[in-house]
Amino acid sequence: MFNLILFGPPGSGKGTQSSNIIKKYNLYHISTGDLLREEILNQTKLGIEAKKFMDEGQLVTDDLVIGMIGNKLDANPDSKGFIFDGFPRTTAQAVALDNLLKSKGSKINVLISLEVPEPVLKQRLLERGLSSGRSDDNEATIDKRITEYKNKTEAVAAYYGDKNLYVGIKGDDNIDQVFTSISNTIDKYI
Ligand code: B4P
């Protein structure tokens, strides 16, 4: 089993690149952002709770997110591997993920971090906001999301860096160039 974390700040291209990776490597895609938006659309209890945080540009609580991941792993026992897109976003989530995978005799093989300068992130998300209909793609909320990333998520990079699993990629080239860099890295680790 090959397990990849696609990591980076909001707007770095995690969702965009995940769709390319799943086509080429046939991995099962788990995006916590997509899962949460689905819960919101279906107006579940979890979705109603999560929306309050997401509209404020804050991270959703660890318990809610970790529960969702556990369910997805259990539901796909025969997958040849997973791409974790936008998860883990806190050190507590990283520890929980490692434990979940360990209990299944598996582990994270590599974390690929998309490195993009802050002005480019803001520009991309503002542009997406013109058509996405996402209530968190506006200037004030984008700023809060980037602050949450710096305060709570950047530590996840160090956590996997200590395990020698961190690989940084230049994420502000065009989509195809970024995908080539990602593929070259996956090919070394798979
Ligand atoms: P997410 O849905 O994970 O998404 P994101 O951070 O907004 O963006 P992503 O990096 O996927 O960017 P994308 O490819 O779309 O998170 C949303 C919210 O959910 C969080 O703020 C949080 O509240 C909550 N949440 C999710 N996971 C959580 C967790 N684990 N714990 C707690 N809370 C959680 O790209 C953005 C734009 O850039 C697109 O328009 C794209 O077309 C463009 N783009 C991408 N790559 C490009 C390139 N190379 N060149 C030019 N444009 C590019």
Image (cartoon, grey):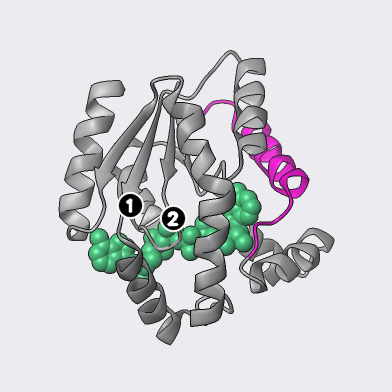
Q: Amino acid at mark 2?
A: Pro
Residue found at the far right of this picture: 45
Percent across and percent down for residue 45 are: 84, 62
Percent across and percent down for residue 100 are: 66, 25
Which element type, helix, strand or loop, lies under badge 2?
loop
Q: Establish if 8 lies above or below 129.
A: above
Which element type, helix, strand or loop, lies under badge 1?
helix
Q: Main secondary structure of the magenta part?
A: helix
Instruction: Identify the magenta region.
Output: 58-79
Percent across and percent down for residue 83 are: 45, 39
Question: Residue 26: which disc?
Answer: none
| Residue 72 or residue 116, whichever sits in front | 116
**Residue plotted at (55% across, 44% down):** 87
Q: Establish if 169 lies above or below 34.
A: above
Does the beta carbon at disc 2 come under 8 Å from ligand 1?
Answer: yes
Pointer 1: what residue? 17
Q: Amino acid at mark 1?
A: Gln
Does the beta carbon at disc 1 come under 8 Å from ligand 1?
Answer: yes
Quadrant where the image shows the N terminus: top left
Q: Is residue 145 magenta?
A: no
**Residue plotted at (24% across, 32% down):** 185
Percent across and percent down for residue 96 are: 67, 30
Q: Can residue 108 be seen in this snapshot?
A: yes
Give the quadrant of residue 123. bottom left
| Residue 157 or residue 129, whichever sits in front | 157
Pointer 2: what residue? 9
Q: Is residue 68 left or right of residue 166?
A: right
Give the quadrant of residue 161. top left
Q: Nearer the viewer, mark 1 or mark 2?
A: 2
Quadrant where the image shows the C terminus: top left
